[in-house]
Image (cartoon, rainbow, N blue to C red):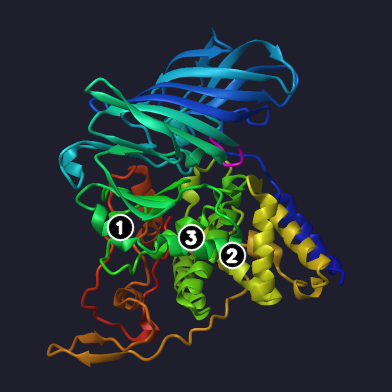
Amino acid sequence: PKIKKKEHTRVGAAMERCSDERDYSSLSNYHAISVGHVDLVWSLDFDESKIRGHCSLDIQSKINGLKEVVLDTRDLDISKCAVGGFECSFKLSPDTEQFGSALKIMLPKPIKKGTRIKVLVSYATSPGSTALQWLSPQQTAGGNHPYVFSQCQAIHARSMLPCVDAPGHKATYTAAVTAPAWATVLMSALEAKPSVGSGEASKTYFWTQPVACSSYLIAIAVGEMEAREISPRCRIWSEPSNVDAAAFEFSQTEDFLKAAESLAGPYRWTRYDLLCLPPSFPYGGMENPCLTFVTPTLLAGDKSLADVVAHEIAHSWTGNLVTNATWTHFWLNEGWTRWFELSIMAKIQGDDRYFDLRASLGYEGLKGDVARFLEAGEGHLTPLVPQLEGIDPDDAFSSVPYERGMNLLFLLERRVGKPEFQAFFRKYVETFAASTVTSAKFVDFFKKHFEAAGKGDLIEGVDWAGWLLKEGMPPEDPKYDLSLLKPVTVAPEANGTPLLSFFPCYPLPRAFWALFLKTRHRPRVGFLGVDRFRAARRARGQLGLDGPARLQRVAVAPAAALPPGRSRRR
């Protein structure tokens, strides 16, 4: 059936904005160059909190007459630039608080479209690098040695290496990292060859990432670490004092991974390892390829918070493999991943109602975030496709792309049916794997898929403009099946405070229900709230999570007055 003219006009206007592929947070000339491979040679200096070394980039011109290569940087001390082995002139633009500085490297002569060159930049990071968190021994669990880890999302890779710091531009990478002999070096990549000792004082580790990924997914962690095998392709890393607890907590990782593969197809990153970081890691988890970072606040002792790993595993397909073209379309990373996470957990639990139950918690968090944005006069950050020109993407992050995005997908699933939508999801991943997507591309692909299947009438009337561009709450409230919530009794204490008395409501850990009734959140940055999140993000990890991760006695409010909370990781 044909779409009505009025609706078609509105959808057309929406798609004009939703097809925008300009990256407003990159200072590079990404429109003129493409980076195919990055080679890193680094040496870690814990005394000065710096990484020293060089970055070599394989670059191809996308235009005729290319005269300069422009890369994103932030607080990097550039000592030399070379093109094709010959030193060349360079300059840094004035620093901007939001986006750093543009490194302009002058080419010896203009080059034609399609010409490939190798650009080498020698540099050192600064102690204030927004991507790197340097910890003293006292800030680690063991207290014996210092530690460093990175967090590059959204636009902090530029403070660790000169690059095209834009999610829509992917490259493979290799690295040779020299660190003190006592340290273990891990990266978001595969081990290329065994480490080599450089005398008694240092050791060099070699890594390779053969699957092209965005710059925000380049990650490193260096410290005193041990590993435990979970399965042939999964390993848990942590400080020695935490590694056994982490191995127990995340022992279901292989099960999550198999459930994900049954929905999305084969896992393409070879290994899925986990690194349980020191408590100052500011997120619940970060989906670095081959090596997910997680916080030790998830070590509840009963695996009740391990579903954070399901979210990060889901990113191996939605985000890392199929990536939002720019941060404007971030919901395509997180909305899909939230839907995929809940689908994985429903499969693990063997009950589709688990999806609805967890989704209902996230919707409460969405209401809170939207209310705070509107109260602060920032309603422009509440649509799925916000206007980010001149805005640091960190300042736009909230539960909106997660929960509003997931609920749009939930609506579409309900319209076409679960089996049909899961088949579409797999086709979506296969089609856009190793590529990037805008909101307009997604909508167009969705409509063509179901129209070709003769089911266009099922998606007629979807308010695409309302979901993607309207400020405030979504145009349609979800209808969840909450039949899993059976009665919970309360018994008064001597002082009149009601105490929680659990029934066997559902085969989930008691801690889940305690958190559900008390706070409706999981220990992720999202529950801090918009303003506190921004402060924490700018502090670059100085603020640790202190969310409840173990079962406590809970004072219960009446069901109708349960406080809305936050449910997302960022």
Q: Position of residue 288 (x, y in %)?
A: 45, 46
Give whichever of 532, 377 is nearer the camera: 532
Q: Position of residue 58 (x, y in %)?
A: 59, 24
Give whichever of 308, 409 is nearer the camera: 308
Q: Residue at x 24, y 29 (%)?
A: 181
Circle 3 Cα neighbour tier, 10 Å, few/some/many (<14 / 14–19 / ≥20)? many
Image: magenta residue range = 165-169
- 37 versus 377 height, above or below: above
The residue to which callout 2 is attached is 263
Which image quarter holds the C terminus?
A: bottom left
The residue to which callout 3 is attached is 257
Q: Residue at x 45, y 64 (%)?
A: 255
Residue type for callout 3? Leu
Which image quarter holds the N terminus?
A: bottom right
Measured Cα–Cα span from mark 2 to mark 1: 25 Å
The residue to which callout 1 is attached is 247
Say whether disc 3 or disc 1 marks the residue closer to the N-terminus: 1
Say whether disc 2 or disc 1 marks the residue closer to the N-terminus: 1
Residue 349 falls in image quadrant: bottom left
